[in-house]
Image (tube, rainbow, N blue to C red):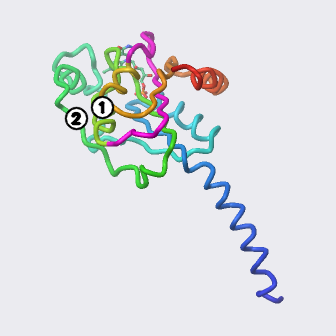
Amino acid sequence: MNISKLAPALLAVGAAGSSFAGTSSDTLVVYFSASGNTQKVAEVIAQDRRTDIFELKPAVQYSQEDLDYRNPKSRSSKEHEDPSIIPEYVGDVSDWGSYKTVYIGYPIWWGLAPNIVYGFVSKHDFAGKTVIPFSTSHSSGHGESGADLARKAGAGDWNSGVGFNSQPLAAEILEKLGSAKTEK
Ligand SMILES: Cc1cc2nc3c(=O)[nH]c(=O)nc-3n(C[C@H](O)[C@H](O)[C@H](O)COP(=O)(O)O)c2cc1C
């Protein structure tokens, strides 16, 4: 078999593959999820929109006790009481400047995003980016959580975002996000 004749065909396949990757790489889904609900939503969005995805994985994972919001001494309660406690996360987005649109997902903790998400937002420059916050919550909904993150970021074109219940169906996620696109 003549390899030199095959090479252009292989290159063509490669080019198609990378151009597909190219259209996706201007959008990023970044999320934090302590117990998996927000992660599922993030994955549905990333899969549907063929985006890159980055998990804000805490350097020290949250245990069940850490997440006990009824205990004022739990880790999550202490973080809620003190916004200066910003948990570290593992790694970071590798090519932040290449993204035009960023979805940011998180669970609602006491009506807002957890401190780790504020940490991410203050560490990155959102100028020139469209930002779509999304959240999951037991019952209280998205509220002012996206607007508050936008204030913290101080730059970027922030959509007010969209809230889901703890375990929404994929169809509901995509339908709600569709209308959130135009909502500012
Ligand atoms: C510390 C903590 C605080 C929470 N505060 C709220 C709240 O204010 N309102 C609400 O509806 N749900 C609240 N929840 C429930 C979570 O928002 C909900 O279970 C979410 O889907 C969890 O997402 P995750 O699995 O991605 O961590 C809280 C949960 C925890 C652990």
Q: Quadrant of ligand 1?
A: top left
Picture residue at 63% right of the left edge, 25% below the top: 178
Tell me where the magenta segment starts and ends, as one range. Answer: 124-144
| Amino acid type of the residue that numbered disc 1 sits on in the rendered structure | Tyr
Q: Position of residue 141 (x, y in %)?
A: 45, 13
Q: Residue at x 54, y 43 (%)?
A: 27
Q: Is residue 135 magenta?
A: yes
Question: Relative to 65, does residue 17 appear above or below in the rendering?
Answer: below
The amino acid type of the residue labelled 2 equals: Ile
Tag in front: 2 or 1:
1
Residue at image x 40%, y 25%?
Answer: 107
Residue at the spot 20% in from the left edge and 23% down from the top edge? 74
Badge 2 vs badge 1, beta-carbon distance below 8 Å:
yes
| 178, above or below 57, in the image | above
Q: Which mark is residue 21?
A: none
Q: Is residue 47 left or right of residue 69?
A: right
Where residue 61 sits, quadrant-wise, is top left
For label 2, the crowd category at 10 Å Cα-Cα, with few meaning under 14, some 14 to 19 and many 20 or more, is some
Instruction: Please state the horizontal and vertical placement of residue 160, each as a whole percent of the image.
Output: 47, 21
Q: Label 1: which residue?
A: 118
Which comes sooner in the sequence, label 2 or label 1?
2
Which residue is label 2 attached to?
86
